[in-house]
Amino acid sequence: MVKGLAELCIKSGEEQPEVCTGILNNYVPIIVDVLIQSDFTPTELCGYFKICSDYGSDNQDIVKERQQSSFSNPHAVGSTKKEYKDITTQEPLVKNLKTNSTIGYFLQLTDIHFDPDYKVGSNPNCGRPLCCRDGTGDAGVIGHYLCDIPLSTVQLIFNHLQTLTDQIDFIIWTGDNPPHNVWEQSQTQQEFATQTLAQLILKTFPNTPVFPVIGNHEAYPSDQYVLPNTQWLLDSLYTYWMPWLDTDALESVKEYGYYTTLLRPGLRVMCLNTLENDMINFYNLLPTYLKGPNNQSDWMINTLEQAEGNGEKVLILGHIPCTVKSASTDQWCAMYEQVVSQFSDVIVGQIYGHTHYDQFNVFSDVETHTKPTGMNYIAPSMTTYQNHEPGYRIYEFDYSTNQIINYYQYHANITDANKSGQITFDLIYSAKELYNLPDLTPASWYNLATQMKTNTTLFMDYFTNLSSSPDKESCDQSCQTKWVCQIFGITSTEFDKCYGV
Ligand SMILES: *[C@@H]1O[C@H](CO)[C@@H](O)[C@H](O)[C@H]1NC(C)=O
Ligand SMILES: *[C@@H]1O[C@H](CO)[C@@H](O)[C@H](O)[C@H]1NC(C)=O
Ligand SMILES: *[C@@H]1O[C@H](CO)[C@@H](O)[C@H](O)[C@H]1NC(C)=O
Ligand SMILES: *[C@@H]1O[C@H](CO)[C@@H](O)[C@H](O)[C@H]1NC(C)=O
Ligand SMILES: *[C@@H]1O[C@H](CO)[C@@H](O)[C@H](O)[C@H]1NC(C)=O
Ligand SMILES: CC(=O)N[C@H]1CO[C@H](CO)[C@@H](O)[C@@H]1O
């Protein structure tokens, strides 16, 4: 099959021969193995991959059944037999705040995707999924908008980030560390990326707590995750994340890839392993009796219940968010949305990455979608891939109310950086000022996003920052509707209803 498909792929001229062969060699064996054992029908598969929006009421039932077998009903929580660890006695990881007031700051780094094989002066338009590695061209000394960033640039970025040490209380590192050379990946390459960045973060911020998150690119092949096959991945995260996490959290990482830990007294982080609900993790097509139940939803609900009982607030950290174009399965997102609704008083925010775009999602009650229940912040990437200015984000946090009260988005200009050989970051906007928000509650964002449906001036503020592309792109009415529907559409059914398809 690999040979036949490779021939077709090469003939199509869409990809270069080594890319065709590389990608097919990586993924076809997994897909074939999974499809043989899967009992999904073609129609169900089409629905699963969000290709068919309407896959019939019969199939909806099957999907629902399947949903119930792999995710337990959040309302039937107490009934799960699994014993969960008592998390009410943990020591907070963030011991000292940097300021004496109740207002503090934390840094989010996401989608760094550095390329150790980046070559200055190579060809950025090579026709493969990732370039700037060979040939001749204008791949700059700092980077190029069509490529991942070189390691030397990551080093310069961390030299700059070091100046934030006295300001930030902790760091959220939302994953995706290796480059996008998906046709020639290896386990060693993925591990090297996480190891290198972990060392760099630790060296730059030796005394700052860090909350790391697993990204889909940490897996090899990218996105493919099932236990026990990918135990190596959890083992390596256990090793590289060791400097920052407590024993309970580390044990959880080794076993599941997710963890919870106390951040400050009364404030908890809950860090998810979103590979378990990655739509292009083909292992998700295995029947439950082969892949095991997705225990993460039960764990998530149990954690939130314990936090609630203990009077704590929870910050959710994850990589692949629940937005239609981001490759989270609909089954997961439907469940997740329900949980966010149910625990809207406990969850104080969701911090994600993955899309490389500067986006946000507003969650609302599942019954009527009129009562805002939660906010998901999706920060843009550090890599320039593809056509993004590298960025990082600083959130302003009020520890007295446990609320995110603002965030500040920083970007670098690669054209300028290539000229000077230095990279500098400028404040691009502060959320509160840019959108003229009274506060950053879900209700205020809901209001703003609702206005964006019809107010093009307002929408364009969101849109220009969304892609942080050096090329100014235009966006017509249907484009505007599409992006606004992504803010509200947590599942594809909701998105389709909003977008009118
Ligand atoms: C998930 O939960 C079930 C039922 O409690 C348990 O038998 C199974 O071992 C768990 N799976 C994992 C990966 O922990
Ligand atoms: C906090 O208070 C201490 C003692 O009053 C003072 O030395 C320190 O400079 C203050 N720090 C900040 C960031 O204001
Ligand atoms: C630097 O970056 C810009 C933007 O990607 C690019 O156009 C330019 O050719 C790069 N290379 C050099 C050597 O300046
Ligand atoms: C649209 O938003 C802009 C910017 O926030 C505001 O100044 C303007 O009054 C709004 N227009 C309408 C018609 O509401
Ligand atoms: C980056 O800087 C160049 C040269 O200073 C400028 O022409 C360009 O518009 C800037 N890019 C962005 C996206 O601001
Ligand atoms: C990168 C970018 O386009 N940033 C823009 C974000 O939005 C504000 C307000 O429209 C602009 O001033 C920034 O240039």
Image (cartoon, grey):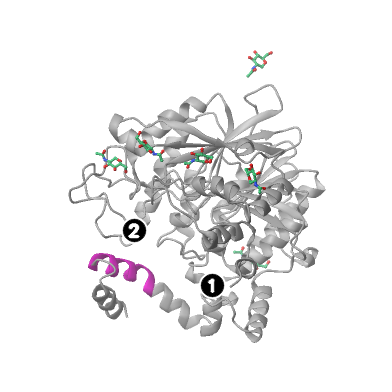
CB within 8 Å, label 2 to label 1: no
Residue picked out by circle 2? 185
Report crowding for label 2: few under 14, some 14 to 19, many 20 or more residues within 10 A (C-alpha): many
Label 1 residue near ligand 1, CB within 8 Å: no
Pointer 2 residue Cβ closer than 8 Å to ligand 3 = no
Q: Which residues are magenta?
A: 17-28
Image: 111 above or below 335: above
> Residue 166 location, x and y as percent?
55, 23
Left/right of residue 454 with respect to residue 219 in the rendered view:
right
Residue 283 point in image, percent of width and height: 50, 71
Main SS class of the magenta portion in the image:
helix
Q: Which residue is mark 1?
A: 50
Is 202 magenta? The answer is no
Lower position in the chain sequence, tag 2 or tag 1: 1
Q: Is residue 487 visible?
A: yes
Query: Identity of the amino acid at label 1?
Result: Lys
Percent across and percent down for residue 323 are 58, 60
